Amino acid sequence: MKCVNALIAFVLVVSVSAQSSSAESQRQTEKTPIIAVGPDEGVVRWLQPDSAKALGQGALLNIKIDRLSVPYTNIMVATQKLAASGIPVHIHTWEDEVIYVIKGQGFAVIIVMVYVADPVGTGLVSSLARPGGNITGVTDMATDLSAKRLELLKEAIPSTTRVAVLWNAADPGMVLRFQELQVAAKVLDVTLQSHEVREPKDFDQAFKAIQDQRPDALFVISEVLTITHRCRVLDFAATHKLPTIAEFGLFAQDGGLMTYGPKLTETFQRSAAYIDKVLKGVKPANLPVEQPMNFELVINPTTAQTLGLTLPPELLIQAVATDKHHDNRCTKIW
């Protein structure tokens, strides 16, 4: 029977040990090697034995976690090598581009997505209820929520008419988010100033253009590139007194004005549950794509005060206030 390789999307490459003809006792002691790809430990935290036991995820009790940070090309080469050896491969990453790149190579893979903005719109699944094929996971509804974030920014600062948008145009999911934002901007009578970044070296040029155009606020479309370099973005915004809104609470914790979106920790936890089910043999076609149920508005009152802003009371009532800064600012995303 042909082995199916598995691609799981958030920051992990999971390689399942091939079954051999060795004794049953040896098979029981074999560990499923999990290679973490990228800088963050969010999902790895939920794969630890204590978390797995507490959540009843027994398949996660027999894994071995290794860490790896490599370019897409190296991930693809590693996947191809493991696939050729007959070992089922799981890649778990929140980088949408990893999914598109490896899926495009024609590997027979199971993809468990985490924080993919619009898997239906980008053609990764047929529908959320019936994803079909070998792809399932969790979507962050980021495309649908882009308009909501712009509304919240306008509510917080009604005088806003020009908004700089910093986004990764190389990611198909982010393209959909920006298009949704354009529709909302027309309704709210806001002019968007698009600033595209595709790699780290693009930020300085984007900052120069933003500085020249003098917007009223900055809207960050959050994905791996902008999150990884968020403190470059937030430090620039602070220097130029730009109110900033993004998706994840960590942007507010690290100095942004406000954020609105799902809680990262809850989505990380759900992704661990998907890994557990896949490792137990559940077919992804039978696992509907999940959408987050809980969203939070996070406001940094210290940043608001620094910017000289008095935010509407009705907005503050809805919000979680944060002015804490991690000792290891900008090194973690959970």
Image (cartoon, rainbow, N blue to C red):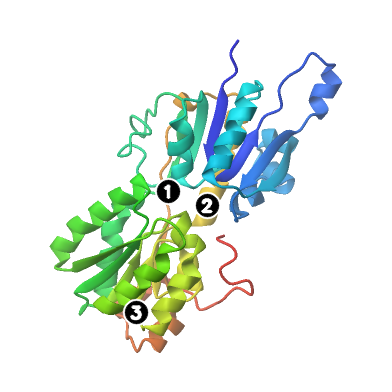
Residue denoted by label 2: 266
Q: Amino acid at mark 2?
A: Glu
Do residues under tags 3 and 2 come within 8 Å of each other at their CB atoms?
no
Q: Earlier in the sequence, mark 1 or mark 3?
A: 3
Residue denoted by label 1: 292
Query: Residue 333 location, x and y as percent?
Result: 55, 61
What's the distance in space between the residues labelled 1 and 3, CA to CA?
Answer: 29 Å
Do residues under tags 2 and 1 come within 8 Å of each other at their CB atoms?
yes
Residue denoted by label 3: 242
Q: Earlier in the sequence, mark 2 or mark 1?
A: 2
Q: Amino acid at mark 1?
A: Pro
Query: Residue 307 location, x and y as percent?
Result: 37, 86
Q: Quadrant of the C terminus?
A: bottom right
In the image, residue 75 above or below residue 226 = above
- Please name whichever residue, 207 or 216, is drawn nearer the observer in this view of the structure: 207
Query: Residue 154 location, x and y as percent?
Result: 24, 72
